[in-house]
Image (cartoon, rainbow, N blue to C red):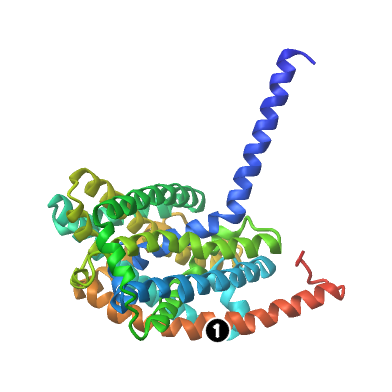
């Protein structure tokens, strides 16, 4: 073989390896990163959520709540969800719940719209507050900037959103690791004392369970990211990894916060308080930029899921969804959510999130783990018996 032929063969080999790595990432890791991107702003981006659901039960009690009921529940339910989607081909939440709940599918839509508006209200409030406190910019600048960026990403579609989510998630992990290491170096003694105190207040397990259910309510919003999964093993592994991928940054953040317990419990945005204590203006700006990006991720993911549901209606009618509809939906939802943001981030999280966690337990989690598992077993039995409705390889 000539030298040029050898180089071409090597290039093709490397190209094939790169494609396999990309495929592996999309099948096993992308769902977890997309899920983490959607939940982070409403799940732990500001730190207020971690105070409400975990830290108020004591440093050790909160850590137990994150590791046991929350992370475990997210992984188990994600495994069931991804396999259900793979078998039945339900890549948007409308078709997913039509298959799961039958005629009662619209119940989830009511809950999902409430969750979208509530989380967008939290995101909008946080965006305005972050730019105001960090850069002294008017509150509306953060809200408008968030609106324009989300509208652009939603208009670009699934491919752009997946790339943005996965890339920003790696950046987020890097910043959180630096944040965690810095906090340990500065406040290691107080962090060790807080965790070593063994304070575990009653209710930690139930609160951790409620937090896990609340995050799981957004699993149907990221089903578009599971299209690359082809086999049961891939669905189960991707689901199992979703819990750790989503919760590891939250755990790092929680440990850093625990050193300031109990004073940090009253802070509206605990992340800002910790950054001020670290005393680095440069890192504070970098962290806030990344945090602002997580607000964009969460808002984009939620609105994109709603758009995918609308697109499913057009597809069922053998029509194409007009491109202008996507950013229009983003604008309408964000404007509606802005009316809720006046209640303040603390009240929105404490009252709204608490109520939604119970609603989604009965709308999504319990039906999936009972009725959903029954339908999966029934499909598997039909496939083994030679039924034409297989596809469960």
Looking at the rendered image, the quarter that the C terminus falls into is: bottom right
What's the residue at 63%, 84% (across, down)?
371
| Front residue of 191 and 18 | 191
Of 386 and 168, the residue lying toward us: 168
The image quarter containing residue 5 is: top right
Residue 207 horizontal/vertical position (percent): 38, 81
Residue 205 spot, x, y in % from top left: 42, 81
* Residue 332 visible within the image: no
Q: Give the percent coordinates (x, y) of residue 62.
A: 36, 74
Question: Can residue 17 be seen in the rendering of this structure?
Answer: yes
> Could you tell me which residue is drawn at 63 percent across and 47 percent down?
23
Element at label 1: helix
* Residue where numbered disc 1 is placed: 366
Q: So how many labels did they put on this image? A: 1
Counting from the top left corner in percent of width and height, residue 353 is at: 34, 78
Q: Which quadrant is home to the N terminus?
A: top right
Q: Is residue 3 left or right of residue 55?
A: right
> Mark 1, residues whose alpha carbon is within 10 Å: few (<14), some, or many (≥20)?
some
| Outermost residue, right side | 386
Instruction: Give the camera-side residue of 243 and 277.
Output: 277
In the picture provided, is 133 more to the left or to the right than 309?
Answer: left
When the figure is inspected, residue 130 is found, relative to residue 42, above or below; the finding is: above
Residue occupying image coordinates x 66% and y 43%: 20
């Amino acid at each position: 073989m000539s030298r040029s032929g050898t180089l071409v063969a090597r290039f093709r080999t490397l190209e094939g390896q790169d494609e396999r790595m990309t495929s592996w990432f999309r099948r096993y890791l992308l769902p977890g990163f997309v899920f983490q991107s959607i939940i982070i702003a409403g799940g732990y981006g500001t730190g207020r959520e971690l105070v409400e659901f975990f830290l108020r039960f004591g440093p050790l009690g909160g850590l137990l709540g994150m590791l046991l009921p929350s992370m475990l529940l997210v992984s188990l339910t994600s495994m069931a969800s991804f396999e259900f989607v793979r078998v039945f081909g339900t890549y948007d939440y409308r078709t997913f719940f039509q298959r799961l709940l039958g005629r009662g599918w619209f119940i989830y839509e009511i809950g999902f719209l409430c969750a979208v508006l509530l989380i967008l209200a939290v995101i909008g409030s946080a965006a305005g507050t972050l730019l105001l406190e960090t850069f002294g910019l008017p509150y509306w600048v953060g809200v408008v900037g968030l609106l324009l960026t989300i509208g652009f990403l939603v208009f670009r579609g699934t491919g752009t959103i997946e790339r943005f989510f996965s890339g920003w998630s790696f950046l987020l992990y890097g910043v959180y690791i630096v944040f965690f290491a810095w906090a340990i170096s500065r406040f290691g003694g107080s962090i060790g004392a807080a965790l070593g105190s063994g304070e575990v207040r009653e209710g930690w397990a139930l609160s951790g369970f409620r937090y896990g259910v609340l995050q799981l309510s957004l699993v149907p919003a990221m089903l578009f990211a599971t299209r690359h999964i082809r086999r049961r093993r891939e669905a189960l592994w991707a689901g199992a990894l979703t819990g750790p991928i989503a919760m590891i940054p939250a755990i790092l953040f929680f440990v850093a916060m625990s050193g300031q317990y109990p004073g940090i419990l009253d802070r509206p945005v605990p992340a800002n308080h910790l950054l001020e204590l670290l005393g680095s203006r440069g890192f504070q700006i970098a962290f806030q930029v990344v945090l602002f990006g997580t607000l964009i991720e969460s808002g984009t993911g939620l609105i994109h899921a709603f758009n995918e549901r609308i697109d499913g209606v057009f597809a069922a009618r053998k029509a194409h969804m007009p491109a202008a509809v996507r950013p229009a939906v983003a604008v309408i939802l964000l404007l509606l959510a802005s009316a809720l943001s006046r209640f303040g981030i603390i009240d929105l999280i404490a009252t709204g999130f608490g109520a939604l966690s119970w609603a989604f337990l009965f709308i999504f989690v319990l039906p999936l783990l009972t009725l959903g598992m029954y339908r999966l077993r029934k499909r598997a039995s039909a496939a083994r018996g030679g039924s034409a409705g297989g596809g469960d390889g």
